Amino acid sequence: MANENTIIGPDLSGMPWEDKPAGCTTVVWRHSENPIIKRNPLPGIHGIYNSAVVPFEGGFIGVFRTESQTRFPFLHLGRSTDGLRWKIEREKIDLISDDPEAGKVWYAYDPRVCKIEDTYYITWCGGYNGPTISVARTRDFKVFHQLENAFLPYNRNGVLFPRKVNGNYLMLSRPSDDGHTPFGDIFLSQSPDMCYWGKHRLLMRSGGERYGQWWQRTKIGAGPIPIETNEGWLMIYHGVIDTCNGFIYSVGAALLDIDRPWEVLYRTDQHILTPETDYEVRGHVPNVVFPCAALCDAASGRVAIYYGAADTCTCLAYTQVDELLQFMKANSQVF
Ligand code: BMA
């Protein structure tokens, strides 16, 4: 298939990549050496997963959900020259806050990292009398300033857009409950200053009886930072079904209007990645694939998706943006 180069952004030829294996018929394919961060990666750490990676100073840097034997999650910094082999710091990220109340966050998980202009923003699910969206900024990954929580509890999966649209910062999020939420739709909110958030718009509903979308019928949540393309914002997200054996987390994709991103143009009417391999169906929470970051190369249209597998380890999968857009157009249901 011709490569139409639809990503708007920098070239990143050094990012991880493997061509689609011969005979593979799916639009997303797994890295051959998954997981890239395996179970028990460090002494006393039994899992690193649902984590966020960005290019930085000629290599890659990441904010990692790291769990010790307490299973209480914190964020740790990691560095890599190739995006595959990671050196994770033993100490959690130290956050500075001007207002001690804003800094009172008990736990931290499912981070995303978004570069906007010359600043990197980290959003994560922080505990402030229940889960909500916490935010910090850094320029150098040495000093981290924690900002105000974006929303009231309870909320999860806060994902920023990589540039302002119509003068405002944009954030996707998923209002939730204080437990293993059995519902959830994605909303889009705007802020002039990264402190006060409003103009909350319903973006996408979970599937259900009416739509025949059982893989995403229970809840949905945004994944990596949306990727700007010349056809719209490519949003990769997770969709969940409740079964008699618990939740199953899969991955889907949608395309949002570039100037009015609260409007969905296409949305895959089927998952593009679902738990199938041993490391996805076995682990601390079986049957979870949970994407939190994507690297992409505008020159080649390559996309590498980082996802947590079974709440235990960190994996990679690949797609080609023009192929994914074509797939979405041919297999779309918007609701
Ligand atoms: C969600 C979050 C994720 C986790 C998923 C599956 O509610 O807690 O971190 O991967 O459940 O356990």
Image (cartoon, rainbow, N blue to C red):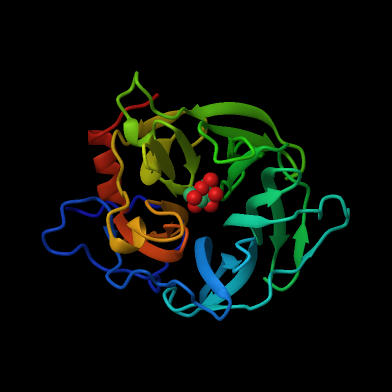
Determine whether, in the image, residue 273 is placed left or right of residue 293.
left
Q: Between residues 255 and 158, which one lies in front from this camera angle?
A: 158
Q: Position of residue 256 (x, y in %)?
A: 44, 35
Q: Residue furthest top?
A: 210
Q: Between residues 292 and 14, which one lies in front from this camera angle?
A: 292
Determine whether, in the image, residue 221 is placed left or right of residue 16.
right
Residue at 47 percent of width and 34 percent of height: 219
Residue at 44 percent of width and 66 percent of height: 313
Q: Position of residue 142 (x, y in %)?
A: 71, 73
Q: Between residues 197 and 58, which one lies in front from this camera angle?
A: 197
Q: Is residue 312 above or below residue 81?
A: above
Q: Is residue 124 above or below residue 268?
A: below
Numbered circles on residues, count: 0
Q: Residue furthest left?
A: 23
Q: Position of residue 179 (x, y in %)?
A: 60, 40
Residue 56 seen in the figure: no
Residue 195 seen in the figure: yes
Residue at 40 percent of width and 74 percent of height: 14
Q: Position of residue 120 (x, y in %)?
A: 64, 60
Quarter occupied by residue 35: bottom left
Q: Between residues 228 and 213, which one lies in front from this camera angle?
A: 213
Which quarter of the rendered picture does the C terminus lie within? top left
Quarter occupied by residue 116: bottom right
Determine whether, in the image, residue 261 is placed left or right of residue 296.
right
